[in-house]
Image (spheres, rainbow, N blue to C red):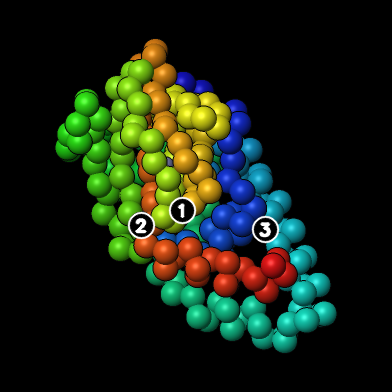
Amino acid sequence: MTKNMTIKHHLNEKLLMSYAAGILPEAFNLVVATQMSMSDEARARLASFEAIGGGILEDTNKEQMSPTAFQDVLLKINKTKPVKKYSASTMVEGVFPEPLKKYAGDELETVKWKSIGRGVKQAILKTDNKASARLLYIPAGTAMPNHSHNGLEMTLVLKGSFHDEKDQFKRGDIEIADQNLHHKPTASDDGPCICLVASDASLKFKSIIPRLLQPFFKI
Ligand code: ZN
């Protein structure tokens, strides 16, 4: 396993911005921080986006927003977790990157899996209740039930790979799913797929992100 991953599927700009602003629920923060720790490219994208985001804010402030609008938004945000930046020194070669170890333990072998049928296992991780995070173990060649999403779902591959109707996802890749995506993730035939999944079952969170980001993206 190489230290620096070549990742095909990255976060979108909206989520990068939300992460940088520290407004994502803990479960999503965990997924993003874990992916950041796996890839120089992911960190570079975040850094460049932070720079672009700063420019957008400056322009927006001049044209439409009051000078204190951004500060006002930040004040409204419950900043329970500061955004943490990961350097190359924090990257690891095992299945669990450093940010995940605080939640899942050091080793894959010590995870307390619970069977959810057909060989699929999951382990719920402890985060705040705005969204949930879990590890998912899918045996080789096994398909998850076809499903759609009530809210936002982020799936980061830690080991093996899976594919769905959309694409194929390998270690370090992240799939972002929302109400528009119906899919049936299936682990590849060559081995089990282990993923870190964060999802927001309620629609509440979904309305928060667009509302907070509206002034910045003029959407
Ligand atoms: Zn899904």
Q: Determine whether the beta carbon of the residue marked 1 sits less than 8 angstroms from the nearest atom of ligand 1.
A: no
The disc labelled 2 sits on which kind of residue?
A: Ala
Q: Residue 212 location, x and y as percent? A: 57, 72
Residue identified by numbered label 2? 201
Which element carries disc 3, helix, strand or loop?
helix
Residue identified by numbered label 1? 152
Mark pair 1, 3: CA separation: 22 Å
The answer to which quarter of the image holds residue 136 is top left
Q: Which mark is residue 205?
A: none
Residue sitting at 38 percent across and 36 percent down? 146
How crowded pointer 2 is (Cα within 10 Å; few <14, some 14-19, many 20+) is rated as some
Residues at circles 3 and 2 in contact by the CB criterion of under 8 Å: no
Query: Is residue 187 shown left or right of residue 212?
Result: left
The disc labelled 3 sits on which kind of residue?
A: Glu
Q: Residue 93 location, x and y as percent? A: 43, 28
Residue identified by numbered label 3? 50
Query: Is residue 103 shown left or right of residue 198?
Result: left
